[in-house]
């Protein structure tokens, strides 16, 4: 079959700084091409160039052919005729793709009528059909709703409906699921597959997530520093990679299906496009680098059928993933929990008033953000608190950090009940419990030098700064000369190291980590995870690790608590919970996470959850998960169901498990990853 | 990494003397490394030198009247010419400059500091503090200036310039303070303020260490603008029989008088005006440099 879209030697530069440097690929009808790269690799710019959506300052050269017709240099009118008809696009942020003031049905009908001659009524009928196809419940009714009345996942479905409205030949998806929760991501990917089956379009899937493309793409193109560094069939890329960068990337991703073992981070950080190394752009970070690498940039060598890699030593590159898999055998050691409890939360409840009205706020309801959560952390232990957005994990965290008496329940931090804290005790806790925030740039005062940032906790608690600051910088792998700089002079990973150094300044006993690696690129993330892991052992810390990424938690936590709608669904030892989750929600959550392993990904059964999270202002009666519970829907008898509807399940230890409990009346272990 | 950074790094690593690269030191360093900052500072220093050392080399003092020369253009005897009264323009200008430099700079600083503190406290603490501070600000905004003057002026004798500076500052700070309050509210929500709170830093220290420095761009621009505003407002205050009174002079009074004779005796106006412009320019240059020095994202070497 001849390709629908052929890109050859595409380059894009902004004011002389190259963002994309000679990328070539082609897609055939019905094929899914995954374009993978970290931030700054040029992957999104390259696709925007195809759509002609770059800002005016961009210089584009090379050729992009759609059905043999050149798009680069085509007039805006010609492009507009293609856009939305032959090529359509799905963006990361669905809100930006929808006009807020029009009903979604009208917007889809509009998209249909822009390229097809149909009457308004017919277009509307088509719009409703499309909404139905992408799985919007009650489509004819929802077609009359405005974009803001949809949840993020539903909005993305609307955007997909719009993208396939004119049976396009190519759909470009730019990080379509990055902003979504995993269970929603699984739904949306499913919709994309359905949409593709319906239209037979080729899909270009741009993502940073090697898991998403593994089960979805036929071929994968890996980008680094504006270039394609490896391209090939999906199995070749994942199992027979010939480029050290690809191997490094795969080695550095935490995986839900692998237990605790050190990740292999890629040293350093991606080069800035304005100052590329002379030879191979990956050379400064490459473990296999030899002198010849600096001579010139390696071209894409043909290393197999349809498989290219830009590395002069490609013959020697071995996938190290296999070796690591073998070593993963002895991970399920039984850990004995420590004696001393550093943090205990008992029946914590937090409500927020739901206010309406612009001038006179009146209370129209109550958001039950946290509704009875209990867990504890022992000395030297890491508890991973996971949940999707709206699960209440952040509220739980702030309740602990604020050190105010909880609305209901008890919070005991380092032996002190927060309901009865004297001033001195509060200061003491503030010294012994420290926080690392999600976004290092936001949590470091941009107007302070690193020295002042690190000195702040020390000064506050009356300790001398000077020498300690150099110690801290060394501890997190930074140089003492970095002290004179500002946070923004650092890369994301380094900033997070500064954040960690600040948290360690006072030698705390408990560290609260709020999504500490989710803002980082995978290759950087691994380094920070390893750092946290080794610090814990060296300094005898206990961690409360809040995250939405279950894979990361598996790598770092000893125990895990899964939250759903303000309550804990399942809690227990990491291996137990991940290997044999008992709560239907945990099972769905784990099965929704894509593995960077194409073969397993293709054979896996997904437990797909239906719909969105119910509003925490109006949670379902009985078990909060019952509206989406696959077990409730498919397996239980009516009698059994009535228990779920009427009685809210408490977390109960599972039979025969040392440390695992689930809040489900019909909990049953089941392996899903 | 810019050159200056490398220098700093070298100083740090050579080990002999570990100078803590605190904000104060880094900002000062960056300020004096920028051309703007150096020029602005040098010009302003020159102005001060002129204002206070100038009278020593002039044979006329500002109270002297040369009864042989009324309204004369500049000459070897009277470098800037003379006024209608026979006063030496050079002497009078320098005298005015002494007053105006001190009054202008101080009033600007005081008013900006007041705006920053009141605004930041109102924005950070919200609730009761906010309500009373906002009320005070609004009150001063709506009350006509002369009314306050009428109330306050009997309380002290005129001629005390410190009181005068405070009075001037009191008229300038309100609007800025309202802006600062709004910005402080948003800074308070930023994560680094949370971080400081969770670290146990007391609120007042958070305001001075995190909130106000993060509004420094606004505050510095405000202070620079206030310098000229203060110098000119001082004129209008003089009309109320307040502030600089004859025979004493200031830039404000000189410009007001000079503008009347500027057409046929340009020297009575243009020297003062020129010096005012140079002063304001120097202050602006310094302000720009200071703002860049505070702002870590500004370009380093220019
Ligand atoms: S060319 Fe050299 S530096 Fe580049 S990836 Fe290959 S071995 Fe590494
Ligand atoms: S209690 Fe019932 S509804 Fe809730 S998770 Fe268990 S089976 Fe599902």
Image: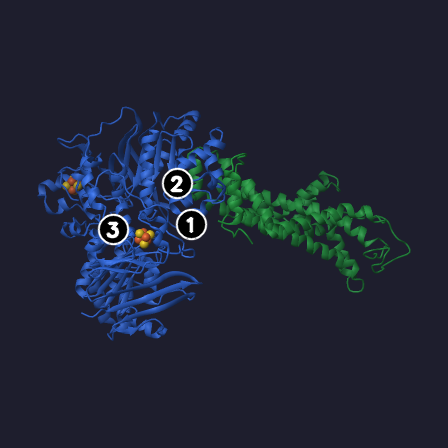
Where residue A207 appears, as percent x and y from the top left, is 28, 55
Q: Is residue B218 visible?
A: no
Residue depth check, mark 3 versus mark 2: number of the one nearer the observer: 3
Give the residue at the far front of this rendering: A291
Rounded to the nearest angstrom, the CA distance separating label 3 from label 2 is 33 Å
Residue depth check, mark 1 versus mark 3: number of the one nearer the observer: 3
Mark nearer the N terminus (1 vs 2): 1
Rounded to the nearest angstrom, the CA distance separating label 1 from label 3 is 69 Å
Q: Which secondary structure, mark 3?
A: helix
Q: The C terminus of chain A is located in which quarter?
A: top left
Tell which chain the image draws in green: B
**Chain ID, mark 1:** A
Q: Is residue B227 left or right of residue A490?
A: right
Instruction: Please name the residue that numbered disc 3 is placed on.
Output: A316
Up/down of A456 relative to B73, above or below: above
Q: Is residue B113 visible?
A: yes
Mark nearer the N terminus (1 vs 3): 3
The part of the image, by quadrant, that contains residue A369 is: top left
In front of the other: B171 or A22? A22
Mark nearer the N terminus (3 vs 2): 3
Tell me the residue at 83%/53% (across/down): B88
Mark 3 and ligand 1: say if the CB distance to the nearest ligand atom is below 8 Å.
no
In front of the other: A588 or B302? B302
Q: Which colour is chain A painted?
A: blue
Up/down of A579 relative to A42, above or below: above
């Amino acid at each position: 079959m001849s390709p629908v879209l052929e890109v050859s030697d595409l380059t894009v530069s902004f004011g002389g700084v190259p963002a994309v440097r000679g990328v070539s690929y082609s897609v055939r009808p019905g094929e899914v091409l995954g374009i993978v790269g970290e931030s700054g690799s040029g992957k999104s710019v390259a696709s925007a160039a195809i759509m002609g959506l770059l800002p005016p300052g961009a210089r584009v050269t090379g050729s992009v052919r759609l059905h043999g017709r050149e798009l680069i240099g085509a007039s805006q009118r010609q492009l507009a005729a293609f856009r939305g008809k032959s090529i359509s696009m799905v963006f990361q942020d669905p809100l930006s793709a929808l006009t807020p003031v029009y009903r979604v049905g009208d917007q889809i009908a509009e998209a249909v009528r822009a390229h097809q001659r149909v009457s308004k009524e017919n277009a509307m009928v088509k719009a409703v059909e499309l909404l139905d196809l992408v799985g919007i419940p009650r489509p004819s009714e929802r077609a009359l709703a405005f974009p803001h009345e949809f949840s993020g996942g539903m909005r993305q479905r609307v955007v997909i409906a719009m993208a396939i409205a004119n049976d396009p030949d190519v759909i470009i998806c730019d990080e379509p699921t990055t902003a979504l929760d995993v269970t929603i991501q699984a739904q949306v990917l499913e919709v994309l597959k359905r949409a593709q089956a319906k239209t037979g379009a080729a899909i270009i899937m741009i993502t940073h997530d090697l898991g998403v493309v593994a089960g979805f793409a036929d071929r994968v193109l890996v980008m680094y520093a504006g270039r394609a560094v490896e391209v090939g069939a999906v199995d070749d890329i994942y199992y027979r990679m010939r480029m050290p960068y690809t191997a490094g990337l795969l080695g550095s991703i935490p995986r839900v299906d692998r237990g605790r073992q050190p990740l292999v981070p890629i040293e350093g950080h991606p080069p800035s496009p304005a100052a590329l190394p002379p030879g191979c752009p990956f050379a400064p970070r490459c473990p296999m680098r030899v002198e010849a690498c600096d001579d010139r940039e390696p071209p894409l060598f043909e290393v197999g059928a349809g498989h290219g890699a830009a590395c002069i030593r490609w013959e020697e590159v071995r996938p190290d993933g296999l070796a690591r898999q073998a070593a993963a055998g002895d991970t399920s050691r039984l850990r004995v929990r420590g004696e001393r409890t550093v943090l205990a939360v008992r029946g914590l409840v937090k409500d927020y008033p739901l206010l309406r009205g612009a001038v006179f706020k009146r209370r129209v309801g109550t958001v039950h953000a946290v509704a009875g959560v209990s867990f504890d952390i022992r000395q030297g232990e890491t508890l991973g608190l996971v949940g999707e957005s709206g699960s209440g994990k952040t509220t739980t965290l702030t309740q602990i950090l604020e050190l105010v008496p909880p609305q209901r329940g008890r919070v005991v931090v380092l032996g002190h009940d927060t309901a009865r804290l004297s001033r001195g005790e509060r200061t003491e806790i503030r010294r012994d419990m420290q926080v690392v925030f999600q976004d290092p740039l936001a949590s470091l005062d941009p107007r302070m030098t690193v020295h002042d940032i690190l000195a702040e906790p020390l000064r506050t608690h009356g300790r001398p700064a000077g020498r300690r600051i150099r110690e801290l910088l060394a501890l997190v792998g930074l140089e003492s000369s970095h002290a004179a700089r500002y946070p923004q002079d650092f890369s994301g990973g380094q900033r997070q190291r500064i954040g960690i150094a600040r948290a360690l300044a006072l030698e705390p006993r408990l560290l609260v980590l709020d999504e500490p690696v989710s803002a980082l690129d995978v290759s950087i993330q691994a380094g920070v995870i390893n750092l946290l892991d080794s610090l814990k052992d060296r300094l005898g810390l206990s961690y409360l690790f809040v995250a939405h990424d279950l894979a990361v938690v598996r790598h770092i936590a000893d125990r895990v608590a899964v939250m759903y709608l303000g309550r804990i669904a399942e809690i227990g030892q990491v291996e137990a919970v991940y290997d044999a989750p008992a709560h239907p929600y945990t099972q769905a959550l784990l099965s929704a996470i894509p593995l960077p392993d194409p073969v397993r990904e293709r054979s896996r059964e997904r437990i797909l959850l239906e719909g969105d999270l119910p509003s925490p202002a109006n949670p379902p009666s009985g078990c909060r998960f019952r509206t989406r519970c696959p077990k409730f829907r498919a397996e239980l008898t009516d009698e059994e169901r009535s228990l779920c509807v009427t009685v809210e399940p408490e977390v109960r230890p599972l039979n025969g498990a040392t440390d695992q409990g689930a809040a489900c009346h019909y909990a049953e272990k089941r392996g899903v990853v | 990494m810019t050159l200056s950074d490398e220098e700093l790094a070298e100083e740090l690593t050579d080990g002999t003397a570990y100078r803590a690269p605190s904000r104060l030191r880094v900002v000062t360093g960056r300020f004096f490394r920028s051309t703007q900052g150096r020029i602005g500072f040098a010009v302003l220093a020159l102005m001060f030198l002129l204002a206070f050392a100038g009278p020593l080399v002039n044979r006329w003092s500002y109270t002297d009247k040369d009864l042989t020369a009324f309204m004369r253009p500049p000459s070897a005897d009277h470098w800037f010419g003379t006024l209608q009264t026979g006063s030496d323009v050079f002497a009078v200008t320098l005298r005015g400059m002494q007053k105006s430099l001190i009054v202008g700079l101080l009033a600007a600083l005081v008013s900006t500091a007041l705006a920053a503190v009141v605004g930041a406290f109102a924005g950070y603490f919200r609730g009761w503090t906010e309500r009373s501070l906002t009320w005070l600000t609004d009150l001063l905004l709506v009350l006509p200036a002369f009314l306050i003057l009428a109330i306050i002026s009997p309380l002290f004798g005129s001629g005390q310039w410190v009181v005068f500076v405070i009075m001037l500052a009191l008229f300038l700070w309100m609007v800025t303070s309202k802006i600062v309050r709004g910005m402080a509210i948003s800074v308070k929500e930023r994560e680094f303020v949370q971080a400081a709170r969770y670290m146990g830093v007391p609120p007042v220290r958070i305001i001075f260490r995190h909130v106000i420095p993060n509004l420094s761009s606004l505050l510095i621009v405000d202070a620079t603008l206030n310098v000229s505003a203060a110098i000119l407002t001082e004129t209008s205050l003089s009309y109320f029989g307040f502030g600089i009174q004859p025979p004493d002079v200031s830039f404000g009074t000189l410009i007001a008088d000079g503008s009347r004779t500027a057409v046929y005796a340009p020297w009575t106006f243009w020297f003062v005006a020129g010096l005012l412009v140079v002063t304001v320019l120097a202050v602006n240059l310094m302000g720009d440099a200071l703002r860049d020095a505070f702002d870590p994202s500004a370009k380093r070497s220019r």
